[in-house]
Image: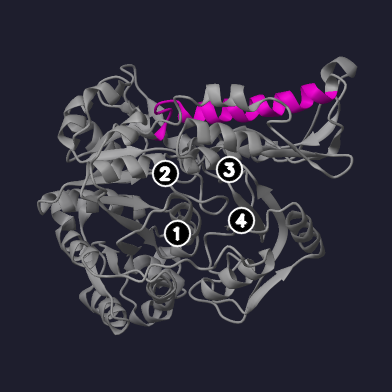
Amino acid sequence: MTDIEIAQAHTPKKITEIAAAAGIDEKYLELYGNYKAKIDPKMLNETNAPDGKLILVTAITPTPAGEGKTTTSVGLADGLRYIGKKSAVALREPSLGPVFGVKGGAAGGGYAQVVPMEDINLHFTGDFHAIGAANNLMAAMIDNHIQQGNALGIDVKQITWKRAVDMNDRQLRHIVCGLGGKAQGVPREDGFEITVASEIMAALCLSSDIMDLKARLGRMIVAYNYQGQPVTAADLKAHGAMTALLKDAIKPNLVQTLEGTPAFIHGGPFANIAHGCNSIIATRTALKMADYVVTEGGFAADLGAEKFIDIKCRKAGLRPSAVVIVATVRALKYHGGVPKTELNNENLEALEKGLPNLLQHVDNVKNVFGLPCVVAINAFPTDTKAELDLVEKKCNELGVNVALSEVWAKGGEGGKALATEVVRLCEQPNNFDFTYPLDMSIEEKLETICKRIYHADGVVLTANAKKQAAQLTELGFDKLPICMAKTQYSFSDNAALLGAPKGFTVTVRNLKVSAGAGFIVALTGDIMTMPGLPKVPSAEKIDVDETGKISGLF
C-alpha cells in the first residue's frame, strides 16, 4: 500500500477526543471539521502544567535516496506512547511547492504518518494563504505609496520586499512589473519568493503572541529611501492590517498520528532559506500537553539543528534534552559515491567512505551543541547485517548508540528501541550551548559557523557582502543571530561535495537583515528563495476521482 492508501484506510479519532486525552480544555479548541483544530494561544497563559522534555530530530545531509526525518519524528512520538510515555509531536507544515514538485507529500510515511494527510499536504487550515496574503498586501502598499506621490522617498532600485506565492515557479523569480502606462503603476524590476521564504513566515514562527507578531511585522525593512535609510512596514502603516490577516494563522494546528498521538503542525520555513522549524507557539503548546515532545528542524543538522538551536532555542528560551540523527544505509552509500541505481547492493567500502558525513553531524551535536544523541537508522529491506554493524561500530567509537527504526513498516512498535534510548538520554545531564555568542561581529559569527559546523577552512565575503556587513553594523543589527542560506546537499556551499568535505571555504555573496524575524540572512552559493519544478513534477501523479478521493500523494 502507498502512503496515501494507508492513511485513507485508517479511521481517525475525532479531534475533540485527541484534545481531551492531551488535557486541552474544549474552550481553547477551534474546530476545522472533525479532524483538525486550532488551539487558542490564550491557553499558554492560563495553564500551570509543567513543560515536558524536548527532543530534536535532525538528519544527515539529504540525498536522493531519502532519509525519513519526518517519518522518524512521527514514529518516535508513537514509539514513546507505545512504551507508556505521554508524548506529542510538533512538526512543520508542508509547502505546496515541494508537494507538487519533488516531494509529493511531507506528512511522514508508511505507518508513521500524521492525518488527515491530504489536508495537511494541501490547503490544511489556510495558514500559508494568510501569510501569502499579508506578504502581498505589503507589496501592494509599497507600490501604491510610490504611485501616490512617494512621500517617504522610497528608492525604487532599493525595494527589498518581494511578492510571494506558495508554488515552485521559476518563471516568477525575476520579473518587470508596472508596465502599461502611468495608471498601471511605476515600472520596476521585481520578483516572487515561495511563501515559506517570506519573512512573515519566519516572524510568525518566532513570535510569542499576536502583539509580538504585530511588533515584528512593523519592524520589517521593506525598502530604503534615497538617503539609504531603511523604510519599514510600520512607516507604511501596513503592520496592523497584516496582523489582522494573520490573527488565525498564528494559532497552532492540532491533528493526530495514525496511532492517535497529538500532533501540532504549524508554520515552517525551509532551513536552507530560513530557520526551518515549526512555530515557537506550537512547540510551547506541545510541551504543556506531553511529557516528551518530538520536534524537527529542516534538512540536515548543519542547517536545521544549527538554526533550531542558535535562533529558535535562543529566542524562545527552549532547552532540548536529546537529539536524534536520522540516517539510512542507502544515503550513506550515496555519500560514499554509489549511484542511486545501485544502492540496493551491499557495499561496505562505499558505506565506510560515506560514514564521515554522519559522524560529523554526530560530532557537532555532541561537541558544539553539548547534547546527548542517538543515531536512528531508518530501516530498508535491502540493508545487510554487515552494513548495519559497521554503522553501529563507527558510532559507538564516538560514544553514541544506534537504534534501528522500523516505524515506516510497524508504526510505534517499530520505534520501541529508539524511544527507549531517547528516554534514557533525556535523563542524562547535558552541556547545552550555542555555536556562537551574539556579541561577536557579523564576520566573526559567519566564520564561527563555517569552521565549527561545516568544518570549513573559513569564510570569504564578496566585496558586496563586506559593504552590506558594514551597513548592517552601522544600522545596529550586528548583534542579531545569523541565518545561513546554504545548499542542503553538502556541508559546503557546493552541492556536489558529498560526504564530509575538507579544504574548502564558504563564500557569502549577500547579507540582508530580516529585522522582523530578528536575524541576518547570509546568502551563499546559488541558493534561491524561489525553487523551480523538476522535469517530471510530482503533480503529474496526483489526481482525484468522482467522489473527491485524492491519489498520488506520497
User: Is 183 rendered above or below residue 531?
Assistant: above
Labelled pair 3, 2 in contact (Cβ < 8 Å): no
Q: Main secondary structure of the magenta part?
A: helix
Disc 1 designates what residue? 309
Colouring mode (rainbow / by chain / secondary structure / one colour): one colour
What residue do we see at 48% from left, 38% from top? 95
Pick whichever of labels 2 and 1 is earlier in the sequence.
2
Residue 524 location, x and y as percent? 66, 60
Q: CA distance from mark 1 to mark 4?
A: 14 Å
Pick whichever of labels 3 and 4 is earlier in the sequence.
3
Q: Which mark is residue 480?
A: 4
Pick whichever of labels 4 and 2 is earlier in the sequence.
2
314 on left or right of 390: right
Q: Amino acid at mark 2?
A: Ile
Q: How many residues crowd around disc 3 within 10 Å: few (fewer than 14), some, or many (20 or more)?
A: many
Residue 186 location, x and y as percent? 86, 25
User: Is 240 rendered above or below residue 522?
Assistant: above
Q: Which mark is residue 197?
A: 3
Pick whichever of labels 1 and 4 is earlier in the sequence.
1
For mark 2, give the secondary structure: helix
Q: Which mark is residue 110?
A: none
Labelled pair 2, 1 in contact (Cβ < 8 Å): no
Tell which tag, 3 or 1, sits nearer the viewer: 1
Residue 12 visible to the viewer: no
269 on left or right of 421: right
The magenta segment is 121-146
Pick whichever of labels 3 and 1 is earlier in the sequence.
3
Q: CA distance from mark 3 to mark 4?
A: 19 Å
